[in-house]
Image: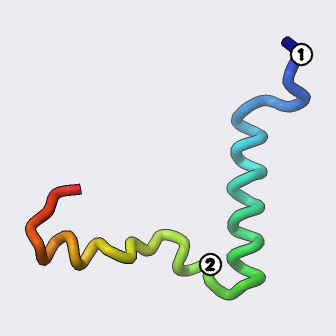
Amino acid sequence: MAKPTMPRFLYMMLGNIGWRVQALRNGVLTKLGDEPFAADAEADGEAR
């Protein structure tokens, strides 16, 4: 198998930065951590 061109942690970090840049451009950066069905699950008494 070929040697990776960059360390795994660096690849993951750059990927995360890419997600955040795209979210910033689309105006949804503050919504990345939202849990759309969390309130419904709590109301129904379901565990995650």
Upstream in the sequence, badge 1 or badge 2?
A: 1
Q: Is residue 46 left or right of residue 48?
A: left
Q: Is residue 25 left or right of residue 32?
A: right
Q: Is residue 32 above or below residue 2?
A: below
Q: Is residue 1 above or below residue 45?
A: above
Dot 2 crowding, Cα within 10 Å, few <14, some 14–19, many 20+: some
| Mark seen at residue 48 | none
Secondary structure of the residue carrying numbered label 1: loop
Q: Residue at x 38, y 76 (%)?
A: 36
Q: Residue at x 28, y 72 (%)?
A: 38
Q: Residue at x 89, y 16 (%)?
A: 2
Q: Is residue 11 above or below residue 45?
A: above
Residue under pointer 1: 2
What percent of the width, then of the height, locates residue 13? 71, 48
Q: Quadrant of residue 19?
A: bottom right
What percent of the width, then of the height, locates residue 48? 24, 56
Residue under pointer 2: 29
Secondary structure of the residue carrying numbered label 2: helix
Q: Is residue 39 left or right of residue 32?
A: left
Inspect the image, locate mark 1, and give the three-letter code of the amino acid beneath it.
Ala
Q: Quadrant of residue 27?
A: bottom right
Inspect the image, locate mark 2, and give the three-letter code of the amino acid beneath it.
Leu
What percent of the width, then of the height, locates residue 17? 74, 59
